[in-house]
């Protein structure tokens, strides 16, 4: 597909949201109608501006300044190499507050935990929600619901995929840090997905269920845990990071499109597998635009080139 400049595409008008905090957190509601839901998503980013992190942030800011942005979805590994120590860790300023400025500072950030965040103090990232006006991580996993002017609805479900990775239980860095077990999270997922109260249910977490990247030949315990649930509820889209590249994968016998957006700073070589629709090894992010009937996913490089575009259609 030929490269396009995203800032030359026709604008959508966006204006608000309903927020529902879950997992034993206090519910907060904000109501304002949307014409189209638009968000940016990327992971594996916090490197004090290095690895083209700052360049990518500048590109995102320019595109967010040209057209309204509802939120940013951060897919984990938010701070390298070992997360943060507390809500006053200097990395909050050097890897987040001073990097994502302008329009990116005005949008709320819904954030997932990655494995590198667990190397430090994952609870501090939850607690920063009370310190920051834009950082939104009310718990280890949570859900947010959006309503648009045409009454179309989107439910975002943010998971903590780390406890599902079996290899982590033998690593000292994870010792006693999983305070919520996988069974409890699965019960919660069932309760949320069973609501079936949205036109679109979008799921996000750090670890991919499929990859053609560096981990293509590794045993994937995330897949065995999540795919049966995603299939049971016919979930259309899952966004993840962990692989430092950009991918779109779709198993032909499964309902879920998986998008890997882990190129927020340093990247790795990527590749392909039988399910690969697209892959690229370049710093970038994904811009997602949702209406009641469609979900457009654009893969954008740090140079603001559109590398790939796909559209999912909801038959109402």
Image (tube, rainbow, N blue to C red):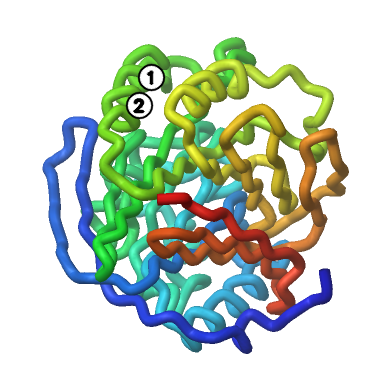
Q: Is residue 183 above or below residue 59?
A: above
C-beta proximity under 8 Å, tags 2 and 1: yes
**Residue 314 image point, x, y percent:** 47, 51
Q: Disc 1 marks which residue?
A: 186
Q: Left or right of 258: which side holds 31? A: left
In what quadrant of the picture does the N terminus appear?
bottom right
The 10 Å Cα crowd at callout 1, few under 14, some 14 to 19, many 20 or more, is some
Q: For the view shown, which residue lies furthest in the front direction?
A: 316
Which residue is drawn at the image coordinates 30% and 28% (left, top)? 194
Q: Is disc 2 placed on a helix, strand or loop?
A: helix
Number of numbered labels in the structure image: 2
Which residue is drawn at the image coordinates 44% and 68% (left, top)? 38
Q: State whether residue 45 appears in this view.
A: yes
Q: Disc 2 marks which residue?
A: 189
Which residue is drawn at the image coordinates 68% and 69% (left, top)? 300
**Numbered label attached to residue 283:** none
Q: Left or right of 225: which side holds 277? A: right
Work out how far the residue at label 2 is from the one at label 1, CA to CA, in angstroms: 5 Å
């Amino acid at each position: 597909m030929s490269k396009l400049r995203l800032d030359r595409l026709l604008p959508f008008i966006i204006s608000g949201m309903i927020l529902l905090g879950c997992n034993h957190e206090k519910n907060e509601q904000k109501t304002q109608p949307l014409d189209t839901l638009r968000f940016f998503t990327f992971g594996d980013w916090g490197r004090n501006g290095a690895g083209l992190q700052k360049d990518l942030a500048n590109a995102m800011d320019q595109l967010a300044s040209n057209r309204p942005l509802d939120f940013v979805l951060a897919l984990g590994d938010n701070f390298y190499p070992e997360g943060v120590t507390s809500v006053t860790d200097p990395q909050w300023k050097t890897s987040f507050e001073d990097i994502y400025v302008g329009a990116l500072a005005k949008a709320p950030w819904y954030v997932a935990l990655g494995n590198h965040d667990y190397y430090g103090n994952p609870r501090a990232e939850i607690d920063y929600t009370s310190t920051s006006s834009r950082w939104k991580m009310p718990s280890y996993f949570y859900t947010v619901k959006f309503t648009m002017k045409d009454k179309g609805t989107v439910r975002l479900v943010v998971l903590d995929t780390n406890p599902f990775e079996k290899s982590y239980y033998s690593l000292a860095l994870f010792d006693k840090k999983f305070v919520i077990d996988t069974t409890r999270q699965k019960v919660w997922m069932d309760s949320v997905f069973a609501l079936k109260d949205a036109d679109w249910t979008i799921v996000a977490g750090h670890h991919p269920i499929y990859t053609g990247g560096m981990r293509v030949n590794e045993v994937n315990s995330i897949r065995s845990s999540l795919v049966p649930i995603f299939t049971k509820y016919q979930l259309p889209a899952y966004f993840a990071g962990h692989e430092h590249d950009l991918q779109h994968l779709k198993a032909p016998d499964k309902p879920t499109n998986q998008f890997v957006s882990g190129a927020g700073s340093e990247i790795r070589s990527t590749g392909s597998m039988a399910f690969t629709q697209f892959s690229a090894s370049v710093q970038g992010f994904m811009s997602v635009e949702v209406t009641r009937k469609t979900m457009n996913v654009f893969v954008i490089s740090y140079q603001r080139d559109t590398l790939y575009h796909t559209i999912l259609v909801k038959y109402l």
